[in-house]
Image (spheres, rainbow, N blue to C red):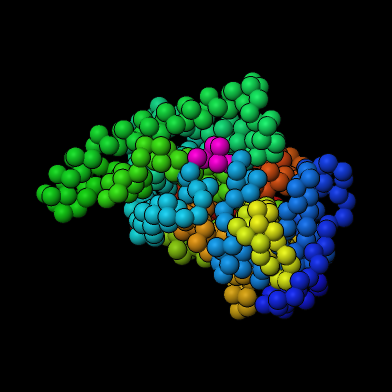
Amino acid sequence: MPHHEESRAVNTPLVTPTPTAPGSLPLIGHAHRLARTPLPFIASLREHGSVVRIRIGTAPAYVVTDPALTRKVLVTDAADFTKGGKIIDALRVFFGDGLATVADGDVHLRNRRLMQPMFNKAHIATRGDAMIDQVRSMVAAWKDGEHRDVFADMNNLTLAAFLVALFGTDLPPHLQEEFTALMPAIMKGTIRQTILPPWANRLPLPANRAHAARVARLRTLIDQAIDHHTSQLPTTTATTAQTGCPHADRPTGLFETLLTAPEPLSRQQLQDEAITLLTGAIETTGTTLAWALYEISRHPQVEQRLRAELASVCQDRPLRYTDVDQLHYARRVLQEAVRKYGPAWMVTRTATRDTKLGGHSIPAGADVVWSPYLHQHDPEVFPDPDRFDPDRWTHADATATRGSFLAFGDGRRKCIGENFAWAELQIILATILQNCSHLELTTRPPRPQAVVTVKPDRLTMSFNRPTTTRLPAGEDRAHRPPARPSTP
């Protein structure tokens, strides 16, 4: 294929003509294709070369379709391609200078180093059981057989679990409730602003004013959560001096790492980072879980294997955080959901100088686009890419796909929360399966809708309760009544 021929020319000094994707219209360029059929369009660019020029309005952008060249953009030549572009500029209005949108440089490096300990596996483990308890209590409130909006449910579960992890279990209930009520509307407003041109977002329209008011309220809520934690920090110091164990007297959260940093962040920076973390936790994780549940409902054999693994690991007791690393098949199911559905489909960088990429000339200031969705649907790397196949991650040659599995990015801007995301995904999926004996799709199959992430346009399912009673610890499993079989 053309992009593999081009990848052999990565180090050549010759200039290769850059093809322009067909279908450009005057004034709007390829905007109509990106708006109407974004996923087929972005995937089709692979047929035209390793770097393909598109037009967004009248401005050119360069789409990289070869994973070897994408690695140059993100890793080896990252200094030539800084975080930026139209999507990032639109998100920066909402995120401020959070870790996901702040420009490359000393501030990004300092903040990343400061936040890295929040997301190591040992630190995440201190929050694991509290997250499980939160998710279990919410799933237990679902009515047996009720038709539920799965995408909304998964966003609510991921937000609630992340709030527990971020701020601790002692976050005042009214704050948690308002976070949960506010975030879906804020995400819709943010997505709207990434689609519209910048001048439209500056107009005093009702939608713009409402979005600005919600963002201001979110920052107020974050301030209140910060103040709540800050007011308790002196007791933590006293407890540490007495017991040698920080946080022994109260449930803490990951965010305390920032509140107690040797080089404290300003209040504005704390708000920006909290917004970035909350949004990342909801949009990508919730989307992945929704698609995973849809695929499980379509594949009875996948559901049966998941339940068998869960029964083997947990026996007859509820999930514990120490079980998560043993749920190997669940991890493969989730990884396949991430691969098939993105979740991000278009990410931008900005060329810092005139440069070459695979022999193609890239002018300074140009947008450079890379697409996890495109790379993760490359049939030469992932045969039959539209097929949901968790077992593709068990093959001995699965390591060969690493350069094309880019859902969390790569290089110095790789998602800092990847470890947390996998833990949260497995916690929520396992908890749902333990508390629901059967999953059934109750609407037509959802269609992928590419906005910031690739989300289902609509997805309603019913969840039935187990028909058997959980045995007390130590009771003979041989006398347990037969479980209700899973059906498609």
Q: Residue furthest left?
A: 242
Residue 139 visible at all: no
126 shown above or below 199: below
Q: Quadrant of residue 177?
A: top left
- What residue sits 71% from the left and 71% below the top? 358
Q: Quadrant of residue 62?
A: bottom right
Q: Of 178 and 33, which appears nearest the observer?
A: 33
Quarter of the figure that contains the N terminus = bottom right
Magenta region, residue range: 91-96
Q: Quadrant of residue 451?
A: top right
79 shown above or below 265: below
Q: Position of residue 51 (x, y in %)?
A: 75, 64
**In the image, is residue 433 part of the stretch drawn in magenta?**
no
Q: Of 226 and 6, which appears nearest the observer?
A: 6
- What residue sits 75% from the left and 52% below the top? 60
171 shown above or below 2: above
- What residue sits 27% from the left and 37% below the top? 230
Say how many tags the image has: 0
Left or right relative to 16: residue 320: left
Residue 485 visible at all: yes
Q: Of 30 and 133, which appears nearest the observer?
A: 30
Predominant secondary structure, magenta span = helix
Q: Position of residue 163 (x, y in %)?
A: 42, 40
Q: Position of residue 376 (x, y in %)?
A: 68, 63
- What residue sits 31% from the left and 33% below the top? 227
Q: Position of residue 462 (x, y in %)?
A: 64, 40
